[in-house]
């Protein structure tokens, strides 16, 4: 076995990857794979908690795999796999659930959010528990959604990962994972699971803003630039990005929409270019058309090679299946070892 620390991260199979995924995760994974024992996987079972169309699910898994590979994740360095290819995960999920409280799952923020959406509730009232229990079967909250954190904990614990690079929104799930690891270890008097920590490779987390002038870039916000956006589409999106009416006074503070565009520019352009637009805002000579043209140009420099590689990989089914088969084999080897230990600890033993 290797001596390197184990890094593991997963992404739900729900749609294409955007610049936020790239700068927040993918570009860091590409660096991590040189220094750590990395496992990156597509969480297709987690995607089932929000009932995707079966054909769309399979396409999404393939798209994300091709995007990972196109962005530079190297299957010779890192283990790339699909969650459902590792049946040991499903078995351990059942076993770990015996040590997880319904209450602690129901208190999870992401569960409350998604349950509210599934029930079509808009308010933030506290009676969500009553609504869940009392609701008729047409509008149900599925049990898979409730146990989402168990499944995620198993993804991590079954590989005995030390470091888990995830965004802020996943911090609570990671906290639960640590709690479950401690609980299991102490209940059975074993030392099976390390407590995984969040991993921010190279310092602070980057927040990638969207093009709508408000928050973070996100799939559900409709404010995304996708890695595989065609050149024309990408340019159009950037040219339509929200700005403001232009600075009215010298040295006035940046408005949020313009700050957002400059943040995107900081990720993709040179510091000199960014500074020149900051200066132009300060002295009121800024022209948003120029800023956007420059921004689109610089984003394309990042995404075009990825998109081109993506197109080649996406149409090479044989290559994709070779990669996932090899990944599954490696992931299963470790998973099977851990599962055997878990079964042993819990008293499920061979006759
Ligand atoms: N829940 C994560 C997300 O939505 C995806 C995920 C599933 C994951 N299993 C994981 C991330 C294990 C890290 C480790 O982003």
Image (cartoon, rainbow, N blue to C red):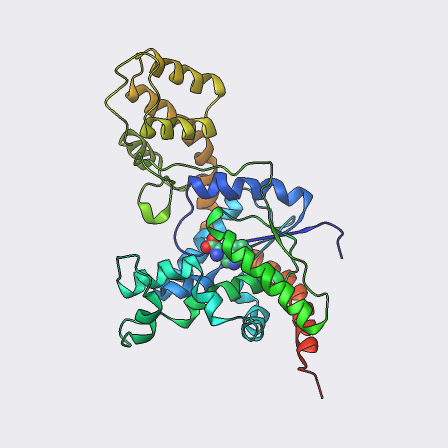
Residue at the image position 47 percent from the left and 64 percent from the top: 148
Farthest left residue? 245
Q: Residue 258, image x and y in percent?
A: 33, 26
Vertical placement of 196 versus 181: above or below?
above
178, 20: nearer the viewer: 178
Residue at the image position 28 percent from the left and 17 percent from the top: 247
Q: Residue 124, image x and y in percent?
A: 30, 57
39, 284: nearer the viewer: 284
Tell me which corner region of the image, top left, top right, bottom left or bottom right, holds residue 275. top left
Q: Is residue 42 visible?
A: no
Q: Is residue 311 left or right of residue 98?
A: left
Q: How many discs appear?
A: 0
73, 142: nearer the viewer: 142
Vertical placement of 27 versus 63: above or below?
above
Quadrant assignment for the N terminus = bottom right
Q: Residue 73, image x and y in percent?
A: 57, 45
Quadrant assignment for the C terminus = bottom right
Q: Residue 157, image x and y in percent?
A: 62, 62
Vertical placement of 183 versus 283: above or below?
below
Q: Is residue 4 visible?
A: yes
Vertical placement of 328 versus 269: above or below?
below
Residue at the image position 32 percent from the left and 46 percent from the top: 221
Residue at the image position 40 percent from the left and 49 percent from the top: 16
Tell me which corner region of the image, top left, top right, bottom left or bottom right, holds residue 338. bottom right
């Amino acid at each position: 076995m290797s001596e390197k620390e184990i890094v593991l991260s997963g992404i739900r199979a729900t749609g294409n990857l955007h610049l936020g995924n790239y700068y927040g995760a993918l570009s860091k994974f590409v660096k991590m794979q040189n220094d750590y024992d990395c496992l990156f996987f597509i969480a297709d079972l987690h995607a089932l908690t929000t009932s995707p169309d079966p054909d769309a699910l399979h396409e999404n898994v393939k798209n994300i795999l091709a995007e990972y590979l196109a962005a530079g994740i190297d299957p010779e360095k890192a283990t790339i796999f699909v969650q459902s290819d590792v049946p040991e995960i499903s078995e351990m999920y059942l076993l770990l659930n015996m040590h997880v409280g319904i209450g602690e799952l129901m208190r999870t923020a992401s569960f409350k959010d998604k349950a509210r959406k599934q029930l079509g509730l808009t308010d933030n009232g506290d009676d969500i528990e009553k609504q869940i229990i009392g609701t008729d079967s047409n509008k149900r909250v599925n049990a898979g959604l409730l146990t989402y954190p168990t499944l995620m904990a198993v993804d991590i614990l079954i590989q005995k990962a030390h470091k888990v690079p995830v965004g802020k929104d996943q911090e609570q799930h990671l906290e639960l994972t640590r709690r479950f690891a401690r609980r299991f270890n102490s209940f059975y008097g074993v030392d099976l699971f390390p407590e995984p920590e969040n991993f921010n490779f190279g310092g602070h987390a980057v927040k990638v803003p969207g093009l709508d002038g408000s928050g973070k870039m996100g799939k559900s916000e409709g404010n995304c630039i996708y890695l595989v956006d065609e050149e024309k589409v990408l340019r159009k999106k950037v040219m339509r990005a929200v700005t403001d009416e232009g600075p009215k006074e010298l040295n006035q503070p940046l408005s949020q929409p313009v700050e957002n565009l400059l943040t995107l520019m900081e990720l993709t352009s040179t510091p000199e270019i960014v500074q020149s637009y900051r200066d132009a805002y300060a002295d009121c000579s800024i022209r948003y058309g120029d800023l956007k043209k420059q921004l689109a140009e610089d984003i394309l420099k990042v995404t075009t090679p990825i998109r081109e590689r993506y197109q080649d990989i996406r149409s090479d089914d044989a290559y994709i299946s070779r990669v996932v088969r090899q990944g599954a084999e490696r992931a299963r080897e470790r998973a099977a070892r851990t599962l055997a230990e878990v079964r042993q600890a819990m008293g499920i033993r061979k006759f």
